[in-house]
Amino acid sequence: MRMRANTAIGGALMALLLGTAAAAVFWTPFDPLRINLRARLQPPSSLYWLGTDEFGRDVLSRVMVGAGTSVVIALLTVLLAVAAGTVIGCTAGYVRGWTDRIIMAVNDALLAFPGILLALAVMIVVGANKFGLILALGLAYTPSVVRVVRGTVLSIREKEYIEASRVIGNSEIYSMIRHVLPNAMAPVAVLATSMFGWVLLAESALSFLGLGVPPPAPTWGNMLAASRPFMETATWLSIAPGLCIALTLLGVNLLGDSLRDRLDPRMAHG
Amino acid sequence: MTAPLLRVDRLRVEAARSGAVIVDDVSFAVERGEFVAVVGESGSGKTAAARAVLGLLPPGLQKAGGQILLDDVDLATLSPRRMRALRGPVVGMVFQEPMVSLNPAMSVGAQMAEGLALHERIDRREIRRRCLDMLARVQIRDPEHTFNAYPHEFSGGMRQRIMLASVMLLKPKLLIADEPTTALDTLTQREVLDLMVGLARDHGTSVMLITHNLGLVSRYAQRALVLRQGKVIESGDTRQILSAPREAYTRQLVEALPRRGTAAVRRQGGEPLVSVRGLRVAFAGRQRLFRRDAGVSAVNGVDLDIGVGETVAVVGGSGSGKTTLGRAMLRLMPTAGGEIRFRGKDVTATANRDFRLSSQLVFQDPYSSLDPRMRVGEIVAEPLRHVPELTTGERDKRVAAMLEEVGLAGLGRRWPHELSGGQRQRIAIARAIVRQPAFVVADEPVSALDMTIQAQVLKLFERLQAQYGFACLFISHDLAAVEQVADRVVVMQGGRIVEQGSRDDIFDRPQHDYTKALLAAAPVLDFAGPATAHALG
């Protein structure tokens, strides 16, 4: 029954997030981009529920619009990293030999390189926009997926049911897709959920350095970055996007755990 | 008559969460210097009962009633501290898995010395001397070297000797041996148990041997206790229990032992289905920086013919190359030389679709040979992917019929983990023969199963073979099973065939010394009871 609680809380948080992001497409209390210098740095009130920022923009509206941007970026980045990492990791782990050695040498070099620096370099090349950000962060997080997938595949390919599949007459590629891959996905699901959180944070770090989604378009990351000078005088500016990131992480992780249990037939009755 | 060393009275062990009764009102006694066997299948509560004596029940299990008196002391009254003082010098335990019961990060000597240093006040030189003596006593070739070596350098049999040595070093009054030789091959099993009996006699130690192997019971134990589902079914003198069991369950156990069937003379002559000439398989050595270590050759020039519908058993100890031979014959392993012919065609080098589709393998471990993410029906249906002329409906029908054939009708929607070991092995067999292969390699297909289940699976296998007429290479170290199913027997040692012949010839008139040793070591029911040489004071 504990699993049900996880699913319920995680699901509720994610539903709230997606609902907000969807609603923001059609309606926000104020125009998130409209500057109103007469209403600068207003604390939360009945008019501005979450207060206003240094340009008098409504924080609630910006958080709502930012939800869409941040979540889409994080989701696409994680998908990219998982897809690329799974294909590369599976190849390395299943083929082994020289292919494995070369892939892993490159991979380890990338792992040793700070991910954020790698993303920075890519951003400089492809430019500071949404897609550049996704590509850069996706590339930065692929190596850890490769590591995890390769390790799992290495242990699963020695299992007897893989040999059984070979005896049946199945091709190597079929065995890999039908038998190895599904059994290797559980750790990847866990990794993906925590990665979702890292990406949200990395996005804010890049925004902070001026390489994220360019202002004035709001993301939680660049809102957080912009709130820094007012941390002591206008706390609501950092609390609102910070809390959003924290709750999203909680939701994703809870949902990820129950998803992993649900995906594994051995745990389904737990 | 003095009080028995161990007296267990109405012992009850329950699972803490579900309240399921694991051990139910079990009472027995072990006299001083006596050798008692506790017999039962998995889930019978035999291990839980033994662990309760040590006060080492696994988490989730708890003692729910009854009394355990060891040397007239009620264990329930002892503090954890005094209980710890008892483990070692009074009660010792040898576990089933020698591969995991020694700490891989500690040298053998350090592990042996641990107990002595804890329980006795002697200096390091004395400890070392006693350890070396004990290692010599368990016939370890080079005690000095062993003392400083690490567990991974030893085989399973050697590790079990080391385990035995370190336990007996403290001269316990009671030795609990939980399936101590189940993971070992027949010859090693005999050696380790003989050593155990010898040591126990030297020190006047009582032994509680937990096992599922009735042959061992008859050879070593004076008294036996048969457990089933936590209850004592029957107890008493070994000879009486095995030769004239009173209870139906005990009789079932004794009857489950494989017996030699009628000599089925199958089609002789004609062209062999599979024919192997001079087959060699080598494992490459480790790749060092600039050179490669010398490899090991696991199969070294084997010639073997298997006729249509014939069962050829391959027997031998671990490391004899029998498993490697089976895998190589299915071309699951690269060969280093020789040739394999299937229906007269050379399939050694070229991929042969006909051979791949008409040969199958049944694995030893039914837990790791089934994909945990596929339903039973999908597993059995998978080989039919390669029979393109079947429609989906025909395929489903064939799978359902096959499941019924192996006694699993209606379980197609289940997951493997929901089934027992015996049921899983039936799935593996169904998967192997659903495509009606001509040749099946069965690698220890029943050795991971309980006795009564073994008998059922062997019978199923025989019936299916009679029905579908596939030839079979039956790899096993269990001579009793071989005796039941084989037409011909091949004995392997060190990668070579040392003897081959008809089943009756091998079992009744063995020629080679190794064959004789294997046969002598095989635990068979011996109604004369434990030989007098083993009888304890």
Image (cartoon, rainbow, N blue to C red):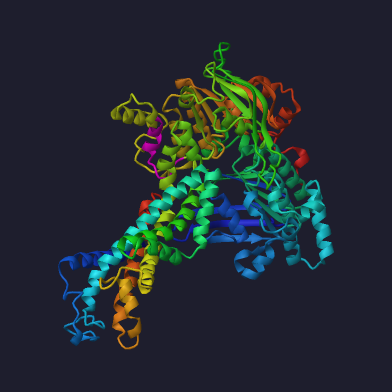
The quarter of the picture where the N terminus of chain A appears is bottom left
The quarter of the picture where the C terminus of chain A appears is bottom left
Camera-side residue of B187 and B217? B187
Q: Is residue A2 left or right of residue B236?
A: left
Q: Residue A29: x percent and y percent?
A: 16, 75
Q: In which quarter of the image is residue A252?
A: bottom left
Say above or below: B297 vs B31.
above
Q: Is residue B143 left or right of residue B216?
A: right
Camera-side residue of B343 and B467? B343
Say above or below: B89 vs B301.
below
Residue drawn at (40%, 37%) of the image: B379
Q: Residue A242: x percent and y percent?
A: 33, 75
* Residue A12 appears in the figure: no
Q: Quadrant of residue A80?
A: bottom left
- The region drawn magenta spans B370-383
Residue drawn at (53%, 40%) of the image: B365
Residue drawn at (52%, 19%) of the image: B309
Q: Residue B456: x percent and y percent?
A: 49, 32
Say above or below: A28 vs A56.
above
* Residue B443 appears in the figure: yes
